[in-house]
Every structure is written in structure tokens, then in C-alpha cells.
Amino acid sequence: MLPENDMPMQHSTEFAETFEALSHIIGEASTWKVCEYFQGEQVTFPKSILQFRRNREIRQKFHDGKNYIELSREYSLTTRQIRTIVHASVESDETYSQLPLQFN
């Protein structure tokens, strides 16, 4: 699928690699939609979004019965870090609480 003018775009190497990676993850049609929507803008995704998802998964698995040691091995974190995550205030995560945490 080419842009509306059907002219191949001149790509920098960095752009081409990013486009290819994104196309591999979400598909070419969706990648073009993202390009059209954010055209001219630089888009970044804060690490805290991924950290929030990871921490929410850790809390859920802990409440489902996994212990600190199992979780520390699964997530390559120390048991102290797992304890901190499990017992942290979930209210501090409100910024991202409305985001879906599963890929479809």
C-alpha cells in the first residue's frame, strides 16, 4: 500500500528500519494509518507504560499464588524489587490505568 499520491517516498535508513519493524509488529496497513495520523510528528512511548503493565502483571500473579522468588526469576528482578512492586500503592499508577494491557 503506497501513500495517496502513489509515489514511493524517499526514506532515510533510520525511517526505513522503523517502518519495517512497525510493519512487522502491526502490519503494513496499520503502519500507514499510524504514519498518516501522526504525520510530521515525532512519537515516543514512555518506558513507564511498559513498566506499569509489567507491575500490574506481577501484582496479579502474586495475588493468584506465585511467590516472590518465582516472580523474581520470571521477571529478572530481585525479590526486594518484587516486594516493592507488590506492595506499592496502585493509585500511583492511575496515569496508565485506563490503557488496555493486552495486544490483540
Image (spheres, rainbow, N blue to C red):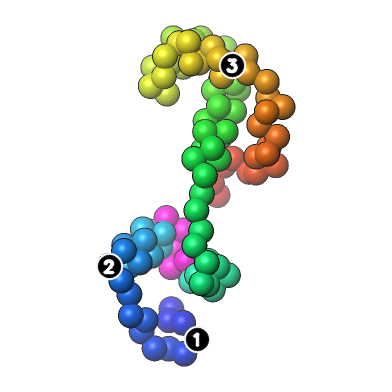
Disc 2 to disc 1, how far (Cα)?
22 Å
Looking at marks 2 and 3 on the same chain, the residue that comes earlier in the sequence is marked by 2
Q: Which residue is mark 3?
A: 86
Residue 77, x across and y down, in percent = 41, 19
Q: Is residue 86 above or below residue 25?
A: above
Residue 80: image location, x then y, percent: 48, 10
Check residue 13 in the rendering and tell me which mark sits there, or answer none.
2
Residue 1 sits above or below residue 13 on the image: below
Name the residue tied to disc 1. Answer: 4
**Which comes before the other along the chain, label 1 or label 3?**
1
Residue range in magenta is 25-31
**Residue 101 placed where, x, y %?**
59, 40
Identity of the amino acid at label 1? Glu
Residue drawn at the location 60% of the way across and 22% of the way down: 60
Q: Main secondary structure of the magenta part?
A: helix
- Is 16 magenta? The answer is no
Query: Is residue 96 rendered to the left or right of residue 55?
Result: right
On whether residue 29 falls in the magenta region, the answer is yes
Q: Residues within 10 Å of mark 1 (few under 14, many from 20)?
A: few
Q: Nearer the viewer, mark 2 or mark 3?
A: 2
